[in-house]
Image: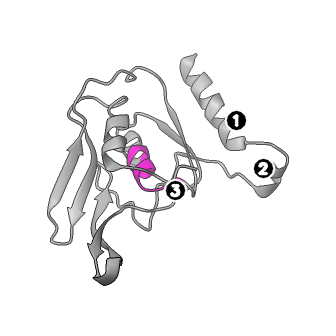
Amino acid sequence: NNPGGYLDSSVEFANLFLEQGKTVVVEVDKEGAKKEYKTDKAPILKDYPTVVLANGGSASAAEIVTGALRDYKRAEIVGEKTFGKGSVQALEPLLKGAALKVTIAKWLTPLGTEINKVGITPDIVVALSDADQNAGRDPQLDKAKSEIISKIK
């Protein structure tokens, strides 16, 4: 589970894996205007095999990174479909200290895939059942480990 974080942090994190100048996410406002967020440094982890674990608790900024690494075929995504929180909100102040959170834009992966209300489907779908969790098993992590090992050999 990774409920997300800040947009700039997700771009900075993706920069560790993606070549300089690559689009990490596209923000589209209600008028259709697009703003691309791109990597701006040489990646220090570009030559390392990478697997991303994802599930329904992966949302927002976590989905930005997952989508970018998937679109550029820079990582294999293992687990379950992500939450699907690909929208940008702003707080509009109201009277007496109240505020209203308003959606002002949506996010698309570099290849133009919508994240909001859709989520990101992993390359390798592996369920994690309650029975697995109760027994201390993690088939998603096990699969991620086996994928990394197969890429190293």
Question: Would residue 8 appear left or right of 150 to someone viewing this image?
Answer: left
Residue 22 image-quadrant placement: top left
Give the camera-side residue of 138 and 89: 89
Q: Residue at x 45, y 52 (%)?
A: 4
Q: Position of residue 77 (x, y in %)?
A: 51, 42
Q: Which mark is residue 133?
A: 2
Between the residue at mark 3 and the residue at mark 2, the CA separation in whole angstroms equals 19 Å
Q: Residues within 10 Å of mark 1 (few under 14, many from 20)?
A: few
Q: Earlier in the sequence, mark 1 or mark 3?
A: 3
Q: Which mark is residue 28?
A: none
Residue designated by label 1: 142
Q: Magenta segment, which residues?
A: 58-66
Q: Secondary structure at mark 1?
A: helix
Amino acid under disc 2: Gln
| Secondary structure character of the magenta stretch overall | helix
Residue designated by label 3: 82
Question: Of all residues shown, which one is farthest toward the front?
Answer: 96
Q: Secondary structure at mark 3?
A: loop
Q: Position of residue 133 (x, y in %)?
A: 78, 50
Amino acid under disc 1: Asp
Between the residue at mark 1 and the residue at mark 2, the CA separation in whole angstroms equals 13 Å
Which corner quadrant holds the C terminus?
top right
Labels 1, 2: front one: 2
Count the marks: how many? 3
Between the residue at mark 1 and the residue at mark 3, the CA separation in whole angstroms equals 19 Å
Marks 3 and 2 close (CB-CB < 8 Å): no
Q: Earlier in the sequence, mark 1 or mark 2?
A: 2
